């Protein structure tokens, strides 16, 4: 996908008069201003009305609030389920040939748009202060559900840190954070303060310990060893933090030996818990992920065509088999397991913060397989 050059940003053709019916997110995207450029990435600042979103699973198995400081993500993970969220930025009256898009060079319905045009939510901290006045502090809040809050641009603009500064002044909230980045170590000071007066659980996603595979699968995410190191450092600071080995990839990372190695490393860095869920492929992520399989694991193409040809989720039998393996590996290495609502603060294993009780433990094999994210 071609991204407009910074020198072209003043061209009137990039910001045409919008169709009369353009509203909501499409209008916010249209009004977003160019903020910066990265490697093959354009950043735009977006004025939003709220940063706290109600998240409801289609299966109504868990319900919480979510915060996404950014819209889109630089990491470019091949399996990313959230690519579809950029589709909401396109006007509803776009024609098949692309006529009507806000910018002819950016098709927000293209899967690559999610990792090539990133929106920065402005005034996030102030908006969060207002949002928190309207909710029950006992409600679960998940930071980073459809974007990584610690993607590289965060190092420069600090939106996630500004959000944590708000929580550091609060008391009695339940906050779960998920990230693939060791940049979270920068905010240990705030995380310690948040955990002192609130319930905080951090989740570090590590799909594989194999750096070469990770680079192909998650091309712009930090190396796995840096993520394991982040777990160790956060645990040393007294923060409750565990590892999400998600998604588990059929034929690639789903063997018992592979999961055992992940669990062994999780135990070595003192992870509070360990969770692993099977891959699910939404239509928006299927072309990108299957292209990765064809390039790097051509012998698995047929298997994936059978598994995901007419379904987004793994079969019940496969999910149960995986859950059994995870349970065995956790027992072998003395790791606590998670229920699959892994963004939330309950059932989170070993206590990592003073004053926080140990939640009820549960066996993954005894629970129905759920999506990690709504």
Image: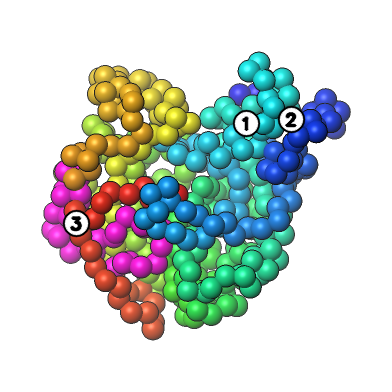
Q: Nearer the viewer, residue 176 or 334?
A: 176
The residue singled out by tag 1 in the image is 108
Name the N-terminal-most of marks 3 and 2: 2
Q: Is residue 2 left or right of residue 173?
A: right
Count residues near mark 1 (Cα–Cα under 10 Å), then give few for <14, some for 14-19, many for 20+.
Answer: many
Q: Is residue 140 above or below residue 88?
A: below
Label number found at residue 44: none
Which residue does the image show at 18% across and 64% down from the upper left? Answer: 334
**Which picture quadrant has residue 335?**
bottom left
323 or 329: nearer the viewer: 323
Q: Left of 293 or right of it: where is 87?
A: right
Which residue is labeled 2 in the image?
102
Secondary structure of the residue carrying tag 1 is loop
Q: Residue at x 55, y 30 (%)?
A: 112
Callout 2: 10 Å neighbours few (<14), some, many (20+)? many
| Viewer-nearest of discs 3 and 2 | 3
Question: Which range is magenta?
Answer: 321-349
Q: Which residue is mark 3?
A: 366
Q: Percent from the top left, x then y, of residue 283?
A: 44, 30
SS class, disc 3: helix
Q: In the displayed image of the protein, which residue is found farthest to the bottom?
A: 355
What's the distance in space between the residues labelled 1 and 3, CA to CA? 40 Å
Residue at left offset 30%, top offset 22%? 305
Residue 93 percent location from the top left of the image:
69, 27
Q: Reading the chain from its start, which is encountered first: label 1 or label 2?
A: 2
Nearest to the observer: residue 137 or residue 355 = 137
Q: Quadrant of the N terminus?
A: top right
Q: Does the magenta-highlighted stretch encompass residue 8? A: no
69, above or below 18, in the image: below
Q: CA distance from mark 3 to mark 2?
A: 48 Å
**Residue 345 position in % (x across, y down):** 39, 67
């Amino acid at each position: 996908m071609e991204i407009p050059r910074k020198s072209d940003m003043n061209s009137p053709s990039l910001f045409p008069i919008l169709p009369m019916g353009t509203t909501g997110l499409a209008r916010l995207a249209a009004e977003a201003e160019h903020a910066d450029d990265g490697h093959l990435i354009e950043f735009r600042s977006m004025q939003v009305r709220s940063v706290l979103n109600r998240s409801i699973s289609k299966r109504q198995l868990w319900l919480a609030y979510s915060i996404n400081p950014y819209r889109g993500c630089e990491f470019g993970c091949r399996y990313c389920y959230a690519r579809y969220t950029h589709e909401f930025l396109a006007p509803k009256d776009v024609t098949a040939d692309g006529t009507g898009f806000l910018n002819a060079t950016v098709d927000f319905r293209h899967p690559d748009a999610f990792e090539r045009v990133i929106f920065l939510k402005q005034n996030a901290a102030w908006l969060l202060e207002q949002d928190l006045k309207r909710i029950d502090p006992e409600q679960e809040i998940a930071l980073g559900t459809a974007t990584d809050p610690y993607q590289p641009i965060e190092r420069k603009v600090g939106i996630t840190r500004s959000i944590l500064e708000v929580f550091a002044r609060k008391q009695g909230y339940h906050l779960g954070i998920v990230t693939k980045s060791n940049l979270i170590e920068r905010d240990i000071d705030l995380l310690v303060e948040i955990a002192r007066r609130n319930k905080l659980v951090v989740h570090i996603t590590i799909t594989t310990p194999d750096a070469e595979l990770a680079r192909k699968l998650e091309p712009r995410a930090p190396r796995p060893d840096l993520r394991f190191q982040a777990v160790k450092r956060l645990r040393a600071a007294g923060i409750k933090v565990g590892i999400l080995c998600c998604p588990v990839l059929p034929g690639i990372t789903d063997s018992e030996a592979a999961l055992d190695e992940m669990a062994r490393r999780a135990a070595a860095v003192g992870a509070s818990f360990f969770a692993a869920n099977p891959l699910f492929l939404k239509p928006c992520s299927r072309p990108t992920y299957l292209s990765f399989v064809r390039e790097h694991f051509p012998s698995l193409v047929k298997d994936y065509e059978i598994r995901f040809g007419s379904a987004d989720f793994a079969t019940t039998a496969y999910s149960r088999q995986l859950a059994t393996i995870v349970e065995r590996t956790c027992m072998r290495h003395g790791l606590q397991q998670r229920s699959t609502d892994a963004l939330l603060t309950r059932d989170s294993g070993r206590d990592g913060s003073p004053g926080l009780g140990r939640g009820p433990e549960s066996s993954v094999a005894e629970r129905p397989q759920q999506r990690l994210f709504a």
